[in-house]
Every structure is written in structure tokens, then in C-alpha cells.
């Protein structure tokens, strides 16, 4: 079986090496000779010393002179990846991709193209790196109604937050460290603003709830505004801060978000540190399941692609025949009663305190002043986010202060 | 599609209810009308008031007068379950089972029968209840060489050990509590002696290492000899005790065991309490993955069976075409350098101490005497279990004392 490999970065080279390594055992077990026939790259010169230099090309037109049985895409980004995948799918050639941006953005239309050309599009590697999550969700849990999904699913931000917590450093210093370690890109926007996590959440949620959800419809907040004092507060309460991606089927719509939250030290997420990812799924029959592992990296991601590849080699994969619901109502605010931490700045302490006790009199309120600044942290319980914001807006207006609110996530 | 349901206990009734509940959505998504056509039970009288009483039968001969598309077995035990499954497989009818005893004992021969009759045998529910584990291992991780597998995979013993630790009670009292709560059977042998965990470990290990392993070939130790003082010792060291099932591909053979071990409070297993199960798989490409959830119960187990069922409904399932290696060397002793805890009884404290320091002089040794008895606990590091046992046997002989050794498991 001839493979077209698009892209030869971290993931692409991992896929190539893993196929080479497994070639013999695949032959032994499945009686198929699976090999990468051609590799598409931007800059040919970089691979002049590669032992398989003769199979590299920098021209898609050149590449497709060959016939292929499978295409694997590891380029990333929307274009030209979309055009390439469309080309293969329209020829009925199965495609495997690790491209979460593309799947979150164009997944439904690509799946439609695959279906109408009687071929398949596989993208296990697009969420959670090597952690098997899409197949378990779609196949093993097919007898469940999925109630909610939560995840720490972006390694870059989790590394930064872990470093801030463990090493007592600022966001900027932790980001720099992440960039030095290769955990963050030079333009870290997609990670630190939560876009990457949101795309993955939307892939999981669309499959889980069988609804087409647009990732840009959901409220997103990243970690670039997290202060050292927010982390100090976590220490003082024995909390951790996590960039949490979570969604819930509310019956009349979906609530889904990516946002920095506090979790207690007893939380299942409390020890998911550094580059580790974790996903918790709740199904009505199975209850809560948790999946943990490295969410990125050369070989973990290549491992997921190999899993998809060996399904295709065995002719095991069919396109999912679920009917996805197209229009879905999105709740913009966290709809459940919960504990919140509010960071208040620039207000007069005395007045703020009075206003807070007036507004939230019936709830347990806990105030702490940051030792090194005029920042006040308040912990309180609110019925839902919308009413909380109304009250906080009023207080901020009256006391002429700024605030930022953090959910205390309860898983 | 007509289903024959064999058995209507906890799992069987869960399967029936879940199929009823999902019938409409299955029809909507897959255009198939999936229904339980007949149910085989021992005692018909128990179901006289069941709304579907007319489909119950207590005769297999009567049952098979009907034609079926799928058989689901939830009876448990080796016979007559084996004969029933053999009958269906030989007719080319796909079979789903939750029966770990049967799969651990007769899995290879049943898979052979399925293969030669061009049908399939599915058993996701046999390990870890609703936790998707066999399919992720077999399919998603197919590009990996599996290095080792570990698991807390028997809910009964985990419940008992959790209760002993949290409530400071004896093994006997905790077992009684487990029986009252329905977590342990009136004859708890299979659970407390580790047989159930071993069968599941062997199913996982056979698939993971692609080798046919006999569960009776591996060393097993249950929890019926755990003393309250062993748990007190766990408290004093901030350890937990877990009945751990683990195996490792040593290259020249397999080491696999079920045994009570200590884990530190930092262990990934430390918080897997009560009826929860957890499995950690290490693959060469993917690294370590952890799967956690409820390992038993009516709907979690039925959830796994529904997953298998919907694969068959979609004609998605093929028999695994791996070639399993038939004869495999089994290592009987833990082969790695590790920390151990030794419980010593009936010896003279002074002499024991002298002998221990003589034997293990080069290693860090830590002694603690149980406050309420003459039991001595020793913590030491040994190169491997075999040499440790030689030294301990000599000490026990010289000092005329008894000992029991516990691995401090390092995951």
C-alpha cells in the first residue's frame, strides 16, 4: 500500500519513522506491504542528506503523478491542507490527518466529501495526541448519551501554568521557558489564547453530542492575563490553576468554553501537570471515564496516526453514519450553581467589602488581600454566571474598580 | 436484527434495558431495528411479571429454534457458556460476551472457532467494565510495541482495601461490609484470591504482547492474608495498599503477577479507590496512558457490550488478524531492582535486626515495630525478587521467624 505523506515536521517525520519501524510486523500480521511512497515538503534543500531524499518533493502536482492508497496529512493550518485533502477524498483515497485546526473548521464539509466519495477521513491524532479518545468516544461509548466533556488538552498552557505554580514565576517568564523548551511556538497566540484547546473541545463535543458546533461560537478565554497573584492565591487555598476546556449538553443547547479555572487539590485534574493531557467523559450508562497521557509530541501523535492507518490497512474503518444536528443553541454563561473566585483591582477596599457583603449577603464570602499589591480576592457561591456578572458589574461600577472572575471547577 | 440474550442477571438486564433505550436512536442513525428476540434464564418463574415474559425461556434448545443475528452472553462461568458460544460461532453468528473467566480460559480456542466460521467474538466488557480498554489497546495502539501493563482491576478487593485503610477495620470486617454492599459475592474466593484480576490481566497481556498466556502459569497472591498492621504500616509511611495486576514484556519472556503492593501517596494509583478501576499501558511510541472509570456494575458493563453491538450493527468489526505466539517463557519473580516492605513475625527482635543488617548491609534499611504486636516491618531495596527471597529464607531459617514480602510498586 502506497502512502502519500504531506509534511515532514515533528509529526510527519515521526509517522515516517514509525511506519518504517512497523513495516515488517504489519507485513507479518496483515500481509500488506505498507510504505511511504512520496513526501511533500516546502523546502526540499532541508532533506538533501535524508536517506530517502529521492521520495521527497516540493510540488503537489509532481506528488500526485503517483497513485496512492492512503494520504497522511501533517502540514497543519487550513490552506493548502484543505485543498490537498479534498483532492484525495474526491478520488476516493482515505485520508488521515492530525490537523485539529482543519477538522474544527472544515470537519463537517470534509466528512461529507469523504462520505459521498465512499472513502473515509480519520483524525484520532487531532485531539489528545496519542491518547485514544475519539474512537473510544465514538465507538466504545456508542450506547451512551454523553452528558458532559471536560479536558486539560493544551500542553503549552498546562506547562506554563505548572511552571508558574511550581517555580513562582510570572506568566511572561514561564512563556519564555516554554518557548526555550520547545513547548511553545514563537507566536504562541493559538495556544495561550485558548484557540487550540477550543478546537479540540469542539471536535470532541461535536462527536460526543452528535451536533455540528462552530468553535468560534463558544466563549474562549486564554491565560495571557493570568497574574502571579492569581497563582499565589491558588497556593494560599491549595488550589491549582488549569486552562480547562469543558462542555455540557444542557438539553436545550450546549454550554462549552475554554477558560482558566481553579481546581482543588482533590480534583482529578490537580495532578495533570506540564505537557500531560487528560479528558473526562461522562456517559449516562458508563458514568465518568478519565483518559490521561501525553497530549502531543512526535511519537505519541504518530502513534495515533498509525492506529488510524492500521484500521485502513485492515479495511476496518467505516465512516460514521451518525446524523449530526446542524443548528444548536449555545449558552454563553456557565449555567450551574458554583463557587467562584473574583479578583478585584483598583477599588477602595472598605467600600468594596461593604458592596460585596450587600450583594452576596446570603452566600458564604471569603476575602483575601494579596500581600504585595492592592488586589483583593473574593470567594463566593453564585447561582449561575449570568447573575454573578450582573452583580459584579454593578459593584465595579459603584466602586470604580476592575474585576476578573474564575470558576472553581468541580471535577 | 434479532438478538439472543443469554443470562438476565445484573449485566444481562442492563443490556436489555440499554438496548430498549437505544432502539430508536440506533434506527435513526444506522437504519437497523435491533431488538432482543429471546432471553435464556435458569429460573423462568422469576420473570413472570416481566413485561416481556413471553420472550424468556429456560431451554437452550427452545431458544435456538429462532434465527438470530447476534448472541450476547452474560451468564458467566466456563460451562455451559462455552457450549452456547461455540454453537453460535459455528453457525457464523457473531457473539458478544462479558465473561472474563471464559475468555481467559478459552479465549484462543473460541477466537479460532470464530475465525474459521468467518464471524467474530467481542469481549470489551470482560475487562474494566465500561472502561474502553481492549479496543484502544488493540486498535488505537496498534503501531506500538507494548512494554508493560499495570492495573487496579478488581473492584471488590479495591473496595475492601480502601475500607480497611479509611475506616481502620480488619480484612474480615471489610469483606463483610463489601458483601453487605453487594460489592462481594457470598463466596468471594475468585475476587479476594486475585483470580478475577489475573484473568483480566491475562486478557490484556495476551492482546498487548500478542502472546497466548495461560492465567494459571503466573504467580498470584490475593488479599486474604493482609493484616490490619499491614494497613497501619501503610498509614505510617503515607503509602496505600492496592491489589495490583501487572505484567511486563522482558524480551526473553513475560513477567506477570497479581499481588498486594504498597504504592506511595504520589502514585497514579494512590487515589483509585473503592470500586474504581485504572489501567496504565506503556507503549514505545505513545508513552504511558492511563484509563480510569468504574470497572463493574450493571450499566457500565452494559455500555461496553453496546459498544461491541453497535460495531456489529455497522458491520465494522473484523476479527483481529494478529498471529499470537503460542509458547512463552514466564518469569516467576519480579525481575527489577525495587523497594520492598518485609513483614517479620515470631522472631527475636535483636537477632533479626542483626541478621538483617548483615544481609542487606549495602542497602538502605528502615525498621519499624508495630505498636500493638511483635510484628517488625523492614523496608529495603533489593536487586530482584529471587535474590531477596534467598536472603529472607536464610534469615527466617536462622531466626526461626516467618516473613511476608510486599513490593513497593513504582507507578
Image: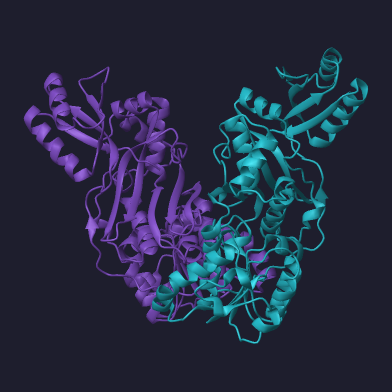
Chain colours: A purple, B cyan
Camera-nearest residue between A335 and A163: A335
> Picture coordinates of residue B341 (x, y %)?
73, 28
Q: Residue B110 is drawn in which quadrant? A: bottom right
Left or right of residue A159, residue A198 in this image: left
A5 versus B352 height, above or below: below
Residue shown at 53%/58% (left/top)? B300
Q: Residue furthest top?
A: B350
- Residue A33 seen from this side: no
> Picture coordinates of residue A31 (x, y %)?
67, 74
A43 versus B20 height, above or below: above
Camera-nearest residue between A43 and A24: A24
What is the total number of numbered labels drawn onto the structure image?
0
> Picture coordinates of residue B129 (x, y %)?
58, 57
Question: For the N terminus of chain A, which image quadrant?
Answer: bottom right
Q: Residue A229 is drawn in which quadrant? A: top left
- Residue A288 seen from this side: yes
A62 versus B269 height, above or below: below
Residue shown at 54%/59% (left/top)? B298
A314 versus B389 height, above or below: below
Residue shown at 46%/77% (left/top)? A93
> Picture coordinates of residue A45 (x, y %)?
44, 57
Q: Residue A64 is drawn in which quadrant? A: bottom left
Residue shown at 58%/61% (left/top)? B10
Q: Residue furthest left?
A: A398
Q: Residue furthest right?
A: B398
Question: For the C terminus of chain A, which image quadrant?
Answer: top left
Camera-nearest residue between A148 and A60: A148
Amino acid at each position: 500500500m502506497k502512502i502519500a505523506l504531506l509534511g515532514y515536521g515533528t509529526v510527519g517525520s515521526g509517522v515516517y519513522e514509525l511506519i518504517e519501524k512497523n513495516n515488517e510486523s504489519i507485513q507479518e500480521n496483515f500481509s500488506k506491504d505498507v510504505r511511504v511512497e512520496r513526501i511533500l515538503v516546502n523546502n526540499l534543500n532541508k532533506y538533501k542528506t535524508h536517506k530517502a531524499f529521492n521520495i521527497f518533493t516540493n510540488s503537489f502536482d509532481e506528488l500526485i503523478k503517483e497513485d496512492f492508497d492512503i494520504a497522511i496529512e501533517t502540514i497543519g493550518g487550513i490552506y493548502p491542507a484543505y485543498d490537498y485533502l479534498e483532492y484525495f477524498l474526491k478520488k476516493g483515497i482515505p485520508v488521515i490527518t492530525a490537523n485539529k485546526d482543519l477538522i474544527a473548521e472544515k470537519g463537517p464539509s470534509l466528512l461529507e466529501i469523504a462520505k459521498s466519495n465512499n472513502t473515509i477521513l480519520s483524525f484520532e491524532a487531532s485531539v489528545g495526541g496519542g491518547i485514544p479518545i475519539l474512537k473510544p468516544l465514538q465507538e466504545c461509548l456508542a450506547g451512551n448519551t454523553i452528558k458532559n466533556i471536560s479536558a486539560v488538552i493544551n500542553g503549552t498552557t498546562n506547562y506554563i501554568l505548572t511552571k508558574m505554580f511550581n517555580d513562582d514565576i510570572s506568566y511572561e517568564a514561564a512563556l519564555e521557558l516554554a518557548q526555550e523548551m520547545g513547548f511553545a511556538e514563537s507566536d504562541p497566540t493559538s495556544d495561550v489564547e485558548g484557540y487550540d484547546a477550543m478546537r479540540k473541545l469542539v471536535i470532541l463535543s461535536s462527536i460526543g453530542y452528535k451536533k455540528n458546533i462552530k468553535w468560534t461560537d463558544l466563549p474562549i478565554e486564554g491565560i495571557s492575563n493570568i497574574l502571579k497573584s492569581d497563582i499565589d492565591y491558588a497556593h494560599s487555598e491549595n488550589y491549582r490553576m488549569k486552562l480547562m476546556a469543558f462542555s455540557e449538553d444542557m438539553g436545550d443547547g450546549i454550554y462549552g468554553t475554554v477558560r482558566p479555572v481553579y481546581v482543588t487539590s482533590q480534583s482529578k485534574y490537580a495532578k495533570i501537570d506540564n505537557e500531560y493531557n487528560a479528558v473526562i467523559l461522562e456517559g449516562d450508562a458508563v458514568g465518568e471515564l478519565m483518559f490521561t497521557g501525553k497530549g502531543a509530541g512526535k511519537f505519541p501523535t504518530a502513534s495515533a496516526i498509525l492506529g488510524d492507518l492500521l484500521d485502513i490497512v485492515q479495511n476496518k474503518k467505516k465512516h460514521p453514519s451518525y446524523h449530526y444536528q446542524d443548528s444548536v443553541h449555545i449558552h454563553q454563561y456557565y449555567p450551574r450553581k458554583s463557587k467562584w473566585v473574583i479578583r478585584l483591582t483598583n477599588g477602595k477596599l472598605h467600600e468594596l467589602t461593604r458592596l460585596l457583603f450587600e450583594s452576596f449577603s446570603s452566600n458564604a464570602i471569603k476575602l483575601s488581600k494579596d500581600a504585595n499589591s492592592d488586589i483583593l480576592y473574593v470567594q463566593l457561591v453564585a447561582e449561575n454566571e449570568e447573575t454573578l456578572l450582573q452583580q459584579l458589574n454593578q459593584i465595579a461600577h459603584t466602586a470604580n474598580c476592575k474585576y476578573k472572575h474564575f470558576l472553581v471547577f468541580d471535577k
